[in-house]
Image: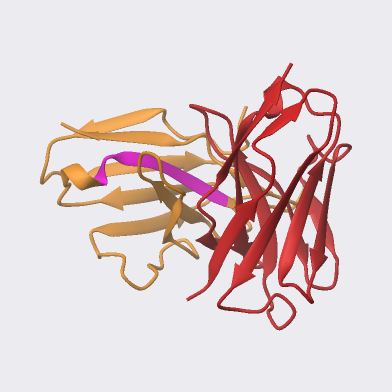
Amino acid sequence: QSVLTQPPSVSAAPGQKVTISCSGGSSNIWSNYVSWYQQLPGTAPKLLIYDNNKRPSGIPDRFSGSKSGTSATLGITGLQTGDEADYYCGTWDTSLSAAVFGGGTRLTVL
Amino acid sequence: QLQLEESGPGLVKASETLSLTCSVSGGSISGSTYYWAWIRQPPGKGLEWIGSIYNSGTTYYNPSLKSRVSISVDTSKDQFSLNLISVTTADTAVYYCAREDSNALKDSWGQGTLVTVSS
């Protein structure tokens, strides 16, 4: 059971928009920065969003992040088949003194 | 360009100790203000943070693994290591090393290494 809760799967058609939620609590999301990772099949995770809403160099602006209270959201617009992957949210949990991940969300581009 | 590479046995017997090393190149562990982390992913499952270490030796561990885990650093070799004792088949996973900042974001990852625990 993950500390952060994500939907197991989401799907949308090419060109459409999708959002992935990440729900936590006061000791993690509410009080710390959230990051998002993309894991393409058979590869290591890659940083997609950091500090709630910043994109590393090379990440297209189709990817966006936001945070409100104890929840965070990853948004992807202009979906492409190459976006099919597993997406994970992560943050620090102050009560646990540990980093935590969400359970992951599989994105299918229909 | 920072690169991380995991190394170690791909097969470990149950009840024994899993030991992995992460070698860092293109940057220095001792000169950085980052933490160095281990993360694992059982086959078909999600990511699980194992723990991290600062170049001073300060460590943080996943509470669920704390009794069995130790992470150490060798700044002279730009390497950090993971030891997991008393393994079971539930410890079978791809093990990743990563660079982690104080906000727990991981901006560089190794390619991962599969460790299978045999019964």
Q: Indicate whether A97 appears above or below B58.
A: above
Q: Residue at 53% x, 28% y: name it.
A: B43
Q: Left or right: where does residue A61 sit relative to residue B67?
A: left
Q: Which is nearer the eye, A78 or A85?
A: A85
Q: Residue at 59% x, 53% y: name it.
A: A91
Query: Can I make out residue A26 in this image?
Result: no
Q: Left or right: where does residue A17 sit relative to residue A72?
A: left
Q: Which of the 4 image quadrants contains residue A17?
A: top left
Query: Can I make out residue A62 in this image?
Result: yes
The tally of labels here is 0
Chain with red colouring: B
Outermost residue, bottom direction?
B31
Q: Residue at 52% x, 29% y: name it.
A: B45
Q: Residue at 84% x, 30% y: name it.
A: B16
Chain with orange colouring: A
Q: Indicate whether A75 appears above or below A85.
A: below
Q: Which is nearer the eye, A29 or A46?
A: A46
Instruction: Give how far across and how far down residue A5 sits, in percent.
Output: 52, 34
Q: Which residues are magenta?
A: A83-90
Q: Left or right: where does residue B55 sit relative to residue A51?
A: right
Instruction: Give how far across and how far down residue B104 sits, in percent.
Output: 62, 59
Residue A86 among those drawn in magenta:
yes
Magenta region's main secondary structure? strand
Residue B6 among those drawn in magenta:
no
Instruction: Give how far across and how far down residue B13 sits, in percent.
Output: 77, 25
Quadrant (top left, top right, bottom left, bottom right) of the N terminus of chain A:
top right
